[in-house]
Image: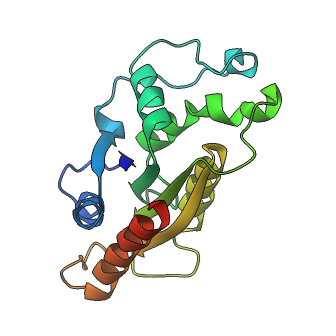
Amino acid sequence: MKTLVIIGAARKNGHTRQMVDLFLEHLDGEKEIIDAYRTEVKPCVDCRFCWKKKECAIKDGMQEIYQKLEEADNIILASPMYFHSITGRMKSLIDRFQVYWAGHVRNDMPETFLRKGAILMVGGAPSFENQFLGGEIVLKNLLNDLSTECLGQVCLPNSDRDSLETRPDIAAQVIALAEKMNRAVK
């Protein structure tokens, strides 16, 4: 089992990375992390080249990411919330997955899910209704366009004061989601 993690956190050792590390500690198989802040990927220019071919006209670090995605059994998306959505670097990287969304235009979108997925999000503010909705919409739709079944999501609110250490309930949810993925892929 191969798992590809795409993380959109600016801080290398922040709460989002701690959630990812805990998740991966309880996940079987090979794991690889792509850090949106440390990639050489240019933004999408909406040239619509991918509307005709399942590839991107921009040749940069995204080519390697496409290859890794194609080889993955699982996709994990992880991001802190910046102004009620995922980070800008994460969004810029996600926009380059337009190649997969364009399968609707090319009429070559797979009819079934090809892999399993999960979402991890962190918010600094105290918990409030719909705190993670903006990120959830973007990340769930991305998984769908990547022909990836979302097995669940875990969110850590109030990370300006809390962490996985002070919120063992959230840590338990992260572990449970990893174990669910282990069972689903076998």
In the picture shown, does residue 37 fall above or below 25? Answer: above
Residue 112 falls left or right of residue 162: right
Q: Quadrant of residue 39?
A: top left
Q: Is residue 95 in view from this perspective?
A: yes
Residue sitting at x 43%, y 72%: 180
Comparing 22 with 74, the one in front is: 74
Tell me where residue 158 appears, x and y as whole percent.
34, 77
User: In the rendered image, which quarter is residue 20 located in?
Assistant: bottom left
User: Is residue 122 visible to the viewer in this orientation of the structure?
Assistant: no
Please tell me in which quadrant of the rendered image residue 156 appears: bottom left
- The image position of residue 66, as x and y in percent, is 48, 28
User: Percent x, y for residue 33?
Assistant: 30, 44
Q: Is residue 19 left or right of residue 85?
A: left
Scheme of image coloration: rainbow
The residue positioned 69% from the left and 14% from the top of the image is: 49
Q: From the top left corner, tell me how far across and down residue 131 is, in percent.
A: 52, 73
Residue 124 versus residue 69 in the image, above or below: below
Count of marks placed on residues:
0
In the rendered image, the vertical position of residue 98 relative to residue 180, given as above or below: above
56 over 124 or under it: above or below: above
At a point 27% along the width and 60% down the height, the residue shown is 24
- Observer-nearest of 101 and 92: 101
Residue at x 32% of width, y 50% of height: 9
Q: Quadrant of the C terminus?
A: bottom left
